[in-house]
């Protein structure tokens, strides 16, 4: 009874998808998870509505040491394939913005759908169960599961990354990789708010709660989305996206209101009515408190007529070429994903199988493929899960 064709460790997005596919191919599949409930990250994702894919998904939306690795799996299981599955289950969805698809109802519908797919494949799911030992004996894997030996031809690691340890996230897949001599690219938190040094934090504290459209640039990352000042630092989609490209010590450039040329706006306003102040003009384009902050920083509280065009240019640059060095990030406590992970060079891009150990697979977030914010990470979980589920 304790012999299986496939054991999947991790009943999250990738693990359930993989198990369902393998089960529906007629494989005898066991899924093990140490959590009380399956797929808790799906449940809390997208504010409870699960941003389950992005219709614009392409390899360019992912970070990886090898940007080509994800191509094969993503091409073979596309957003359209997942949408077809969702529609087969009658789950209503909508596009929110930038190709991001969400459930109209609840993320729970996606979890139920995956569990139903597992049931259709005769998959056994054991929750609140720990794996304590893994050995490769002959051509099979022998695991100690809840104190009992379980054997399988294929072992799939789908335990995700280290983000949000409070929800049971662990570095288990990395440990298993290391145990079998497979390289792990340094894991680090991604899609995570920035923290600031105490001086800048105190200075920006009065702006807490303000959101503005920005273009944020750091290293190879450039994103036009919203930035949010918080009581802990900076957050919002632009910040989360940029954080995945950021390395400690690097500077981040911010163009607030990238859709307008503020220098021209200010000089035109001066010509039109020199008695008005810069803060009033900026406040037509920025939240009032933010406009006031930049004008005070520049010391330009008087009427525009008294301010040189050069000084107005400097004021505009302080808003549209604002640069800061994050002190750090909020870390795994709030990070939506974990960057790095199992070295893709060790895996087949078609099947996710380890090149050095046939029968061992790694899928989902534990692999060194990390998506942008916006449904890409789930699409990778589905696609890599299908790749392994069709092969294991
Ligand atoms: P996932 O983390 O889903 O599953 C891993 C499973 O393994 C868990 O069930 C865990 O309990 C189990 N596990 C871990 N260690 C174990 C061990 N030692 N033994 C046994 N079991 C173990 N992405 C997206 O595309 N759209 C979105 O809307 C969101 N929203 C979002 C919100 C928040 C708050 C977070 C934290 C993350 C997101 N994400 C997201 C990211 C997305 O949730 C993530 O990329 C996927 O869930 C990864 O799927 P995996 O199956 O790889 O891991």
Image (cartoon, rainbow, N blue to C red):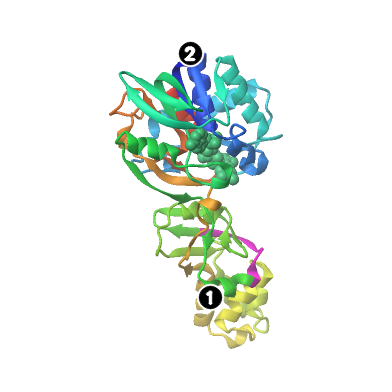
Residue at the top extreme? 26
Quadrant of the rendered structure where residue 72 is?
Answer: top left
Is 126 placed above or below 95 here?
A: above
Q: Residue at x 45, y 59 (%)?
A: 217
Q: Secondary structure at mark 1?
A: helix
Residue range of the region highlighted in magenta in the rendering? 206-215
- Is 293 situated left or right of 349 in this image? right
Residues packed near mark 1 inside 10 Å, few (<14), some (14 to 19) or many (20 plus): few
Seen from the viewer's position, the closer of residues 98 and 151 is 151
Please indicate, yes or no, whether residue 122 appears anywhere in the rendered image: yes
Please indicate, yes or no, whether residue 316 appears anywhere in the rendered image: no
Is 237 placed above or below 174 here?
A: below
Expressed as whole percent of the image width and height from the top left, the position of residue 6 reads 44, 20
Residue at the bottom extreme? 306
Q: Secondary structure at mark 2?
A: loop
Expressed as whole percent of the image width and height from the top left, the position of residue 204 reads 59, 71
Q: Residue at x 49, y 27 (%)?
A: 147
Dot placed on the residue nearer the N-terminal end, 1 or 2: 2
Tell me, for residue 25, which label it has, or none. 2
Q: Residue at x 64, y 85 (%)?
A: 303
Determine which residue is flagged by label 1: 199
């Amino acid at each position: 009874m304790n012999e299986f064709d496939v054991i999947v460790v991790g009943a999250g997005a990738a693990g359930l998808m993989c198990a369902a596919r393998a089960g529906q191919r007629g494989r005898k599949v066991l899924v093990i998870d140490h959590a009380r409930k399956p797929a808790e990250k799906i449940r809390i994702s997208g504010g409870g509505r699960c941003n389950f894919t992005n219709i614009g998904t392409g390899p360019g939306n992912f970070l990886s040491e090898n940007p080509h690795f994800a191509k094969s799996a993503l091409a073979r299981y596309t957003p359209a394939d997942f949408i077809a599955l969702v529609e087969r289950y009658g789950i209503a969805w909508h596009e929110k913005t930038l190709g991001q698809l969400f459930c109209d109802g609840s993320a729970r519908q996606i979890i139920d759908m995956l569990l139903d797919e597992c049931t259709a494949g005769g998959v056994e799911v054991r929750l609140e169960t720990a794996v304590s030992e893994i050995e490769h004996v002959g051509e099979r894997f022998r695991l100690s599961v809840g104190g009992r030996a379980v054997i399988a031809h294929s072992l799939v690691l789908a335990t995700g990354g280290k983000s949000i340890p409070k929800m049971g996230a662990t570095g288990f897949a990395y440990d298993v990789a290391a145990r079998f001599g497979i390289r792990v690219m340094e894991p680090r938190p991604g899609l995570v708010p920035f923290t600031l040094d105490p001086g800048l934090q105190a200075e920006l504290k009065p702006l807490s709660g303000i959101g503005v459209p920005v273009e944020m640039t750091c290293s190879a990352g450039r994103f036009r989305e919203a930035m949010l000042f918080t009581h802990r630092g900076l957050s919002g989609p632009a910040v989360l996206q940029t954080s995945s490209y950021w390395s400690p010590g690097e500077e981040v450039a911010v163009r607030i209101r990238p859709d307008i040329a503020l220098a021209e706006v200010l000089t035109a306003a001066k010509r039109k009515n020199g008695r008005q102040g810069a803060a009033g003009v900026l406040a037509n384009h920025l939240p009032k408190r933010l406009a006031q902050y930049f004008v005070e920083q520049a010391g330009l509280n008087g009427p525009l007529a008294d301010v040189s065009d050069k000084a107005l240019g400097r004021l505009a640059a302080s808003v549209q070429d604002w640069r800061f060095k994050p002190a750090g990030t909020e870390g795994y406590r709030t990070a939506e994903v974990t960057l790095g992970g199992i070295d893709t060079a060790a895996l087949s891009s078609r099947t996710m199988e380890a090149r050095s150990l046939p029968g061992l697979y790694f899928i989902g977030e534990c692999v060194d493929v990390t998506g942008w914010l916006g449904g890409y990470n789930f699409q990778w979980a589905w696609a890599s899960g299908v790749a392994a589920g069709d092969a294991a």
